[in-house]
Amino acid sequence: MSETINFQVPTMAELMARGEEPEVLFWVGCAGSFDDRYKKVTIAFTKILNKLGIRFAVLGTEESCTGDPARRAGNEFLFQMLAIQNIEVLNGYNIKKIVTACPHCFNTLKNDYPALGGNYEVLHHSQFLQQLINEGKIKLQGGGEFKGKRITYHDSCYLGRANDVYEAPREVLQALDAELVEMKRSRRHGLCCGAGGGQMFKEAEPGNKEVNIERIEEALNTNPNVVAVACPFCMTMLADGIKNKEKETEVKVYDLAELIDRSL
Amino acid sequence: MFMIEQIIFIICLASVGYIAYKRIRRIIQNIRLGKDEVIKDNPSQRWQNTLLIAFGQKKMFDRPLVGLMHFVIYVGFLIINIEVLEIIIDGIAGTHRLFAPILGGFYTFLINFFEFLAVGVIVVCAIFLIRRNILRVKRLHARELTKWPLTDANLILTFEILLMLAFLTWNASDTVLRERGVEHYNIAGIGSFWFSGILSSLFEGWDTTALVVYERFAWWFHILGILGFGIYVTYSKHLHIAMAFPNTYFARLLPKGEMRNMPVVTKEVRLMLGLPETTNGNSDTSVSTESADATPGRFGAKDINDLSWKNLMDAYSCTECGRCTSECPANITGKLLSPRKIMMDTRDRMEEVGQQIESGKEAFTDGKSLLDNYITREELLACTTCNACVEVCPVSISPLDIILELRRYMIMEESSAPGSWNAMFSNEENNMAPWKFSPSDRFNWADQLKSGQ
């Protein structure tokens, strides 16, 4: 791919003004928009979309939180306020297909919005990338940066158990020609990072250990070079866990999109 | 003599039937304390789940060795019940081994097969007692598994061993009586039984009267034990032997990530936003317990009558195996939450309310509720909604559904969220994000990309 590529991030408003429709709406999510670490994932995924010439758009400042943390914390009013306003925007732009790098946004848009009048084809970026790989649109250069590296994949609860997406992220990783190693608890039995259900936004209840420490210990037992994640909350929790274990120089936490973008 | 025995048997049978009927009616009424929820969609998928997960015990084999041992007890229980049919008919009619002349050589095979299963049940129950009490398997020991739940588990296993021993020694003493050609026992055409044949050497030195007394004792102990156990089960965690089937049938088919919608809230929010009332939404009533027009009782659940009847059926289906708790991230890291306890609490509260109704008092006037009197807020707040408990439950129970409904009550009726959640709520309300960033900065991430950096 050319290094002098001129990256575009068109918004729905711009597209509409030009009378165009995108193939897919990239739902960035709050973490993807504001969290310094996950903004890199947003950028990586945007680069992939640009490099492959996919006609996409984002909502830009018209996007709001899907309402997932409010709903799981029990605040249904707040959730529906956000959800219904988002649905008004999405339906206003006649959106059919959405891709997002956040499993929480993915789950909420896909499963929670239909009952409120929002019906879309929703893909998580792992599924989207898997399709592109299967269609031969993503061709990774042999001997890329992660060839032969040990990668362990941490299942996000809202991708895995919540929506039974276990294989797409693994197939994406396999395309890197890396050595994929599984943790003891994986797929259906994957251990949560500790951030779901509103936990990201409060202190954990009293216990004898933090969930992310329990999980990172299990990940480190596989002697990985990379812990691959597919969720902004998992990213934060596991990166914090690695810092806690003082392993941040040896072991990196990357999102699938970053791994693919760097190997394209 | 035989006449009296028959009359006593019929009285026992009728009494057990009456007690069981009353108890089953109570359980059904308790489940109906829950809110209506229409579960009628996709019957073919539901039957398939019932076949694989309930009859086939698919999820039990997540842990293959325990799954296999449990399967032995399950098959033993199901198949030995065929023998119970003969025993009941014999008891009423005053006959002895009525099926033997009808089935001929197959009868010998059948009894041998039952005996084989009975020995299997004894072995597995003994291993389970050892696992529970001597090896002290971690998931079988928790703060919710003391007192009655602990006794209940041991009683069930001990009782099953005794019942199977009664069956085997009954066959053994009967064999000796048959061999001696004692009247009433001398049925022709019955071959030898392998396991009880070994045991019958114990009885060979006994005189015939003592043998008849033992044979009658074992027969009565076995059948009264089974009938008594049938009633005991309705008060015990062991009720899963019946509830597993309907509970799996009615288990939700939606993606586990989907939360029950609240149409009442939708109506209000749309009014507030100045939108027309209709949502054009899927008329997906299968996931909502109330229609938008019904007067809402409470938001969320404070007590069992705020939960759906399916949540309550879940509670009666739980056999306290603790697979949920052993995979719960909160529990693993020492937090108070145990999904198994959520189910046990729901059941205990249901039984408590049921007893109030039974004794003629008005239900729910005891000043107690599921929230606070049984389940604490600390437990609810520890849940990461990761669905691990729902995924592993062998009988498709959802502790998560109950946790989320109780959370809704805490937040929406009482506004009693932890401070940091209130801060998150206020960010969501004012900044459209859970963090305190300006909505106008939401698209700033693209600046560096567009400037070519």
Image: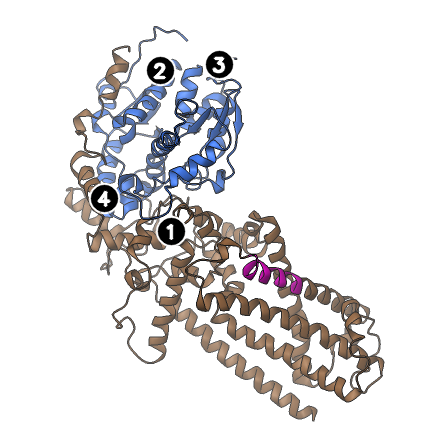
Q: In the image, which residues are magenta?
A: B121-135
Say what amino acid the circle numbered 4 marks.
Answer: Trp
State the residue in front, B380 or B191: B380
Instruction: Give the Cα distance between marks 3 and 1.
Output: 43 Å
Mark carried by residue A144:
3
Mark carried by residue B400:
1
> Disc 4: which chain?
B
State the residue in front, B189 or B386: B386
Task: Say which element carries label 3.
Answer: loop
- Which sits earlier in the primary sequence, circle 1 or circle 4? 1
Task: Say which element carries label 2.
Answer: helix
Who's brown, chain-wise?
A: B
Who's blue, chain-wise?
A: A
> Disc 1: which chain?
B
The answer to whether marks 1 and 4 sit on the same chain is yes
> Disc 2: which chain?
A
Q: State which mark lies toward you, 4 or 2.
A: 4
Residue A39 to residue B139: above or below: above
Say what amino acid the circle numbered 1 marks.
Answer: Leu
Task: Say which element carries label 4.
Answer: helix
Residue B253 in view, yes or no? no
Say what amino acid the circle numbered 2 marks.
Answer: Asn
Q: Residues within 10 Å of mark 2 (few under 14, many from 20)?
A: some
Horizontal side of residue B273 vs A218, given as left or right: left
Q: Position of residue B243 (x, y in %)?
A: 49, 63
Given contact means CB atoms under 8 Å apart, are the residues at marks 3 and 2 in contact?
no
Mark carried by residue B421:
4
Residue B402 to residue A188: above or below: below
Q: Position of residue B328 (x, y in %)?
A: 42, 48
Q: Quadrant of the N terminus of chain A?
A: top left
Question: Label 2, on which residue?
Answer: A50
